[in-house]
């Protein structure tokens, strides 16, 4: 009996996908849009920041890294609450009227994803052999060329930071639930839809959505992993 | 005008003085060896000459230009100098991309293929372009490093113990490449080495460093003909012995190095001499072998050290000898501490000065 909802969910997932169910597809696209934009922004901000922290020595570097490492484990619910207070009508950014919009969800996921990109990039860039620096300089690299060379050497680790950030963003439910409100056709994403269907007792639909979520995550990670391994033959 | 010249060069790190008031002149076309025990400041000197670090005191003139200039000018100067470090590190990409790197960062777009080919040919690694650089052996990586340093046609090539940790075959390959670079390509070479025999074989000028101070400098033949106590003190690790030479027929001499050991060498010298036997040129066997080698000694293995591409053995044959063999030979011979071995080397492998 226990396996029934799972089997049913599998069939349901397949059915929803092949019949191009409009609501499911809109939920999928919103999920991808919110997490995709959040991770792209986190990458654009996080990689240069992580590289700068790793390559420079400055006062308070260690304290900063402790902070970043703590932020990497930030509970999404807490982020949701924080962004909610920021965007709510009485909050400092209330006039922008962003609460319960996909933009609010992107902001929340950006806050979750960015520390992961920064933290993992710092560690990836920091673990590039110091001899690479002397090698590049001795072969005539400028400061900028040196930095780019070191980043290229750290490529595997840097792409890992993006994979981890994407995983954290697409799978979190607490923050998008609070700041998005799980509004049908507007701010409902796969994770919040799963919570919603489960509460309704629609287990097979919830499982179908879960399977779709896994499938999407797999495809994105497959692409990122190919990037990670391109040019490496070991 | 000297190609590169240092004046009272001093470098300190925190509390330690790595180099103190070192003044050397290296002329265009020189093969300049810097010898000294480890920790003498050889690497520091080379890093300073490559303008990777700045001296704490004193100055470096490259072609008469003071190198204590703004970053951009230092870069222009540095781009005329190639260096090969003791430990070769490769970029995580193909051999081709590794060798093309210096050209690309200089914005050179013309004939990269041809120049990479040429550089790989120089180091005897034609056809290695598509290999992944991280799969190379230590000797191959060192040769690719040499190709990287030569591909942009430097005026000065710096070599920091380029053959330390390598197996005998790669040592001799690299030595002949480096010699060719100096003689045929007319590139000025500065090589740091703790191996006096190597300096004697390759260099035209020799400087001896001890504890960061320049102890001796001059023509190789002069500095090495009468090796000072200092030179001998760290030469022990490369089979250097003093002895009395007694001429035999056929241009051979019997050299008594004490402890009842007599070595046959191809020399006409007599009287007090210093002999070197390169660790790579000693053939090791576990049973006596019949060969053309004029010298055979019996001893016991007293030390085994793993090198990147080979194995270094200390052998007690009344006097201590250092032998470097390949890992394959080491495994095939099933050697252990206390193993009995025979050392065989030719009279022509003994260098007498």
Image (tube, grey):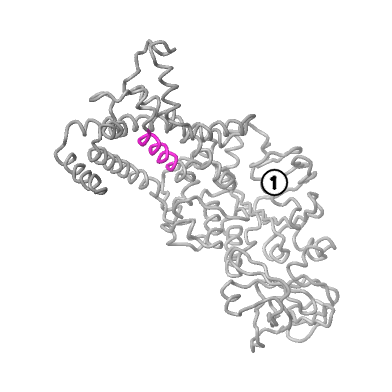
Tell me where residue A93 appears, x and y as whole percent: 41, 13
Tell me where residue B176 appears, x and y as whole percent: 59, 65
Q: Is residue B337 left or right of residue A38?
A: right
Q: Is residue A111 left or right of residue B244?
A: left
Q: Secondary structure at mark 1?
A: loop
Q: Is residue B332 above or below residue A225?
A: below
The quadrant holding residue A22 is top left
The outermost residue toward the front is: A1
Please identify the dominant SS of the magenta region: helix
Of B195 and B328, the residue lying toward us: B328
Of A170 and B64, the residue lying toward us: A170
Tell me where residue A91 appears, x and y as whole percent: 43, 13
Label tally: 1
Q: In the rendered image, which quarter contains the C terminus of chain B?
A: bottom right
The quadrant holding residue B289 is bottom right
Q: Residues within 10 Å of mark 1 (few under 14, many from 20)?
A: some
Of A133 and B179, the residue lying toward us: A133
- Residue sitting at x 27%, y 48%: A2
Q: Is residue A162 magenta?
A: yes
Q: Which residues are magenta?
A: A159-172
Q: Is residue A219 magenta?
A: no
- Residue sitting at x 77%, y 65%: B235
Location of mark 1 (residue): B2
Q: Is residue B260 above or below residue A19?
A: below
Judging from the image, mark 1 belongs to the subunit labelled: B
Tell me where residue B37 appears, x and y as whole percent: 76, 58
- Residue sitting at x 42%, y 49%: B112
Q: Is residue A70 left or right of residue B201?
A: left
């Amino acid at each position: 009996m226990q396996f029934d909802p799972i089997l049913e969910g599998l069939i349901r997932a397949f059915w929803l996908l092949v019949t191009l169910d409009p609501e499911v597809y809109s939920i999928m696209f919103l999920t991808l849009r919110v997490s995709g934009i959040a991770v792209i922004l986190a990458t654009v901000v996080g990689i240069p920041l992580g590289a700068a922290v790793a390559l420079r020595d400055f006062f308070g570097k260690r304290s900063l890294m402790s902070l970043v490492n703590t932020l990497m484990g930030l509970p999404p619910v807490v982020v949701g609450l924080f962004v909610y207070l920021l965007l709510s009508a009485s909050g400092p950014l209330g006039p922008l009227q962003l609460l319960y919009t996909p933009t609010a969800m992107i902001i929340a996921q950006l806050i979750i994803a960015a520390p992961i990109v920064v933290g993992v990039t710092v560690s990836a860039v920091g673990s590039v052999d110091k001899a690479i620096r002397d090698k590049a300089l001795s072969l005539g690299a400028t400061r900028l060329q040196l930095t780019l060379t070191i980043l290229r050497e750290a490529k595997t680790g840097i792409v890992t930071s993006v994979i981890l950030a994407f995983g954290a963003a697409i799978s979190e439910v607490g923050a998008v639930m609070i700041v998005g409100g799980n509004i049908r056709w507007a701010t409902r994403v796969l994770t919040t839809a799963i919570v919603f269907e489960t509460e309704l007792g629609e287990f097979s639909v919830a499982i179908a959505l879960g399977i779709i979520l896994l499938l999407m995550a797999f495809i994105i990670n497959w692409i990122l992993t190919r990037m990670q391994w391109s040019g490496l033959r070991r | 005008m000297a190609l590169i010249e240092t004046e009272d060069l001093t470098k300190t790190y925190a509390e330690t003085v790595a180099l103190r008031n070192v003044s050397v002149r290296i002329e265009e076309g020189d093969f300049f060896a810097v010898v000294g025990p480890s920790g003498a400041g050889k690497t520091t000197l080379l890093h300073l000459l490559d303008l990777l670090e700045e001296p704490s005191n004193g100055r470096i003139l490259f072609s008469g230009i003071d190198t204590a200039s703004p970053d951009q000018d230092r870069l222009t100067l540095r781009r005329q100098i190639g260096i090969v470090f003791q430990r070769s590190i490769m970029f995580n990409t193909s051999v081709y991309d590794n060798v093309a790197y210096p050209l690309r960062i200089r914005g050179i777009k013309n004939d990269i293929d041809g120049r990479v080919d040429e550089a790989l040919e120089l180091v005897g690694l034609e056809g290695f372009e598509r290999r992944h650089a991280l799969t190379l052996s230590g000797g191959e990586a060192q040769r690719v490093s040499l190709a990287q340093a030569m591909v942009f046609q430097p005026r000065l090539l710096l070599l920091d113990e380029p053959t330390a940790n390598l197996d005998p075959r790669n040592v001799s390959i690299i030595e002949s490449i480096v010699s060719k670079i100096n003689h045929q390509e007319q590139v000025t070479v500065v090589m740091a080495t703790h191996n006096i025999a190597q300096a004697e074989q390759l260099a035209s000028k020799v400087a001896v460093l001890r504890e960061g101070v320049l102890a001796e400098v001059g023509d190789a033949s002069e500095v090495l003909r009468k090796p000072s106590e200092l030179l001998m003190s760290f030469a022990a690790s490369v089979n250097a012995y003093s002895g009395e030479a007694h001429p035999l027929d056929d241009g051979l001499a019997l050299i008594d190095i004490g402890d009842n050991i007599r070595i046959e060498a191809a020399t006409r010298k007599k009287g007090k001499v210093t002999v070197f036997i390169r660790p790579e040129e000693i053939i090791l066997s576990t049973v006596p072998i019949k060969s053309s080698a004029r010298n055979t000694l019996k001893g016991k293995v007293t030390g085994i050290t793993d090198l990147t591409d080979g194995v270094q053995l200390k052998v007690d044959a009344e006097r201590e000898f250092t032998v470097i063999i390949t890992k394959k030979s080491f495994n095939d011979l099933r050697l252990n501490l206390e193993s009995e071995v025979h050392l065989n080397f030719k009279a022509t492998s003994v260098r007498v000065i």
